Image: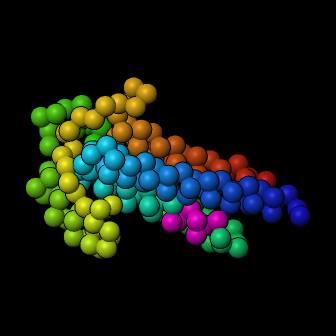
Amino acid sequence: MNEQTSRLNRERRFLVLLGLICISLIGGALYMQIVLGEAPCPLCILQRYALLFIALFAFIAAAMPGRRSLTFFEALVVLSAVGGIVAAGNHVYILANPMVSCGIDTLQPIVDDLPLAKLWPLVFQVDGFCSTPYPPILGLSLAQWALLAFVLTAVLVPLGIYRNRRRA
């Protein structure tokens, strides 16, 4: 096995790990929703979609045989992370400014009309308000943790591509 193949395999392992982390984060959100009774708001659901798309594109990228197709799906991972940054960043802003609304009246019908909301309503339907404060975890709100995860994804995936391919 040559060095380039070894680097691409390392990149693929990273993508599988990223996908598993995203699926785990969705599982954690479902635990908080079902067991702890924390109702998801429209921005929470949009963050779940971003996590799902990151996981899906990461798994597809890891299965791609060539460098170009791998890079294409990694770009989709980064775009999904940017979408997550927008949703989580907006959520963090709303939590910091409780007088601001997430527009549940505006966003709820749009989010609830997405195909996955009809297929898996427990996972993808809106049931709460963005301004509802839940107890922080290690000093950060869930939205802040999500924002951190999306930013890390948007930074680390291109960094990994650059590092693994600069000598190729």
**Residue 57 lies in magenta, yes or no?**
yes
The range drawn in magenta is 56-62
The residue shown at (81%, 58%) is: 6
Figure check: 114 above or below 19: below
Q: Position of residue 122 (x, y in %)?
A: 29, 62
Q: Position of residue 84 (x, y in %)?
A: 39, 51
Q: Position of residue 94 (x, y in %)?
A: 22, 38
Figure check: 129 above or below 9: above
**Type of colouring:** rainbow
Q: How many marks?
A: 0
Q: Choose between 150 and 165: the one closer to the eye.
A: 150
The residue shown at (39%, 26%) is: 139
- The rendered magenta stretch, by its main secondary structure, is classed as helix
Quarter placement of the N terminus: bottom right
The residue shown at (16%, 33%) is: 98
Position of 129 with respect to 135 (left or right) is left
Position of 78 with respect to 14 (left or right) is left
Residue 143, can we see it? yes
Q: Position of residue 14 (x, y in %)?
A: 65, 53
Q: Choose between 127 and 68: the one closer to the eye.
A: 127
